[in-house]
Amino acid sequence: MSRAIDPVSAVDWRTAATRVPIPSGLWVGGEEREAAGRRSVITPRDGSTLSKVAWADASDVDAAVAEARTAFDRGPWPRMSARERGEVLLRFADLVEGHRDEIALLVSLEMGKPIRQAWEVELRAAVRCLRFYGGLADKLAGEITPTVEGELSLVTREPAGVVAAVIPWNFPLTIGCWKFAPALAAGCTVVLKTAEQSPLSMLKVAALGAEAGLPPGVFNVLSGDGIVVGRRLGEHPDVDIVTFTGSTAVGRHFLHYAADSNLKRVHLELGGKSPNIVFPDAPDLDEAADSAAWAIFFNAGEMCTAGSRLVVHEDVAEQIVDRIVATSSKWQPADPLLPSTLMGPLVDERSLGRILGQLEEGVGQGARIRTGGSRTLQESGGPYLEPTVVTDAAPDNVLVRNELFGPVLSVQVFTDEDDAVRVASDTEYGLAAAVWTTDLGRAHRMSRALRAGTVWVNCYEEGDMAVPFGGVKLSGNGRDKSRHALEEYTDLKTTWVKYE
Ligand code: NAP
Ligand code: MG
């Protein structure tokens, strides 16, 4: 009798980590290249150095953009049939899937994500994204609009050119795939800058792209500093689109770079402070509480969509908070290379210091820590933080206002539906929100009232490649995923023909 094998638990990841090949160059023009400098990559697992990797400067950016420009202006990629481009992306997906263990390990090592989540969530999302745009590549059609006799209008979608993608470290593969896969499917060429903390996994993916059949220069990956490489991409006259995911502050910089250079289009996916709103008539209050814990502790809270504000009705607030506090014990951080680990370290010491500083400030402003709030596992050498729940924070408390980007939940209480909308909407951000209720009318009223890119009802963080993802207000202006993202990497062209 065959027994199902758990593919994550079946691997000894700590031993595998000592053997995994670590990419060391830049990926430019279809090959690994040296860079102006080198930089140590540190794993937050234990603070040790993984390797030294090539670190780009502005001249390396210029070389990569020149490759992408040439590949777009004169290479085969934008000119081949959309179906053939789709086939390359489908082969690319198969190759990434075939290297799932190796790439998941690189993700876990570089930014501390538990190996189970790297393998099951991050790699699955990356492969699904490549397959989705591989399949969609040849399904984007233009329009023929009504005209008079003897004239014909054609509205076509043209690939928009050279795309610069600048990404964060919290989902080093998924977020990058959400950008380069639709851009490539549309016929664009790409220069992608990874985040300083997580340069490794995407370099491996780029090499697989070449193996899948991407022509040289179509997909280039740079490691380097934002202020040097990101900025140069933002200002570059030969870049046509910047697609960025990261903080609101850096998103603003990209708008300035574009305004001061060639007015390139800038797609922004930025931060969030998303409200998770629980009414007393939630289908199951225990499930709502467990989901609220997941929404803030998954990926150590390093999620732009983290449910970082629990907005809960006063009648059930204590019950829900008590359950989240009790549940938090199962989220205590541990070595990310153990398959049983649910929460690993934060990405780096700087992030830990920043969050501890804001916790101290928030407590000084009157917030009460109900559980957690301290560094833990210090002997490991990594920046681990306890899962943390905070109550009694006033609306202007830093813990209610700021995106902490860590496992810190702020609890806010409301009295009725109008009050729930008021409390939930009192934020500069508009990325996501959730509502827990069995009242169908209330669910729809709330969804209409909340200004956010996504509203979940009786769930959190559910989704699919087919639905768009992005925010409003200071959470950004672009949409990743879905057919809409494919359109973002095209320009509309009108061809008007007078044939008589
Ligand atoms: P970040 O500091 O904004 O960095 C994002 C990227 O921008 C990195 O590659 C970074 O390079 C680069 N960068 C930094 N300064 C730059 C500059 N002056 N000019 C050009 N590029 C620059 O964000 P992060 O710390 O990586 O990630 C956390 C933030 O991202 C949070 O605010 C979170 O909400 C947001 N986020 C949003 C989403 C979403 O989909 N909406 C998803 C994930 C994360 P370095 O390598 O030098 O850091
Ligand atoms: Mg950074």
Image: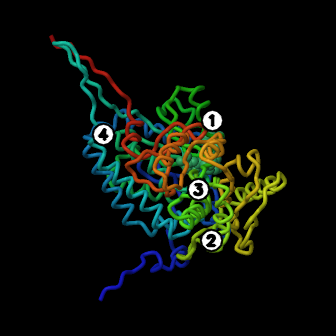
Name the residue type under label 3. Answer: Val
Secondary structure beneath disc 1? helix
Which is nearer the N-term, disc 1 or disc 4?
A: 4
Given contact means CB atoms under 8 Å apart, are the residues at marks 2 and 1 in contact?
no
Q: Which of the two discs, 2 and 4, sits closer to the camera?
A: 2
Local crowd at mark 4 within 10 Å, few (<14), some, or many (≥20)? some
Work out how far the residue at label 3 is from the one at label 2, CA to CA, in angstroms: 17 Å
Which is nearer the N-term, disc 2 or disc 1?
A: 1
The image position of residue 236, as x and y in percent, is: 54, 32
The image position of residue 240, as x and y in percent, is: 47, 32
Name the residue type under label 2. Answer: Thr
Secondary structure beneath disc 4? loop
The image position of residue 271, as x and y in percent, is: 60, 46
Compared to residue 394, the image places residue 114 above or below, namely below
Mark 4, residue position: 76
Give the image quarter of residue 42: bottom right
Which is nearer the N-term, disc 3 or disc 4?
A: 4
> Could you say which disc has been placed on residue 327 in the image?
2
Work out how far the residue at label 1 is from the one at label 4, CA to CA, in angstroms: 35 Å
Q: How many marks?
A: 4
Secondary structure beneath disc 2? helix
Compared to residue 95, the image places residue 27 above or below, namely above
Q: Residue at x 50, y 46 (%)?
A: 454
> Could you say which disc has been placed on residue 252 in the image?
1
Mark 3, residue position: 278
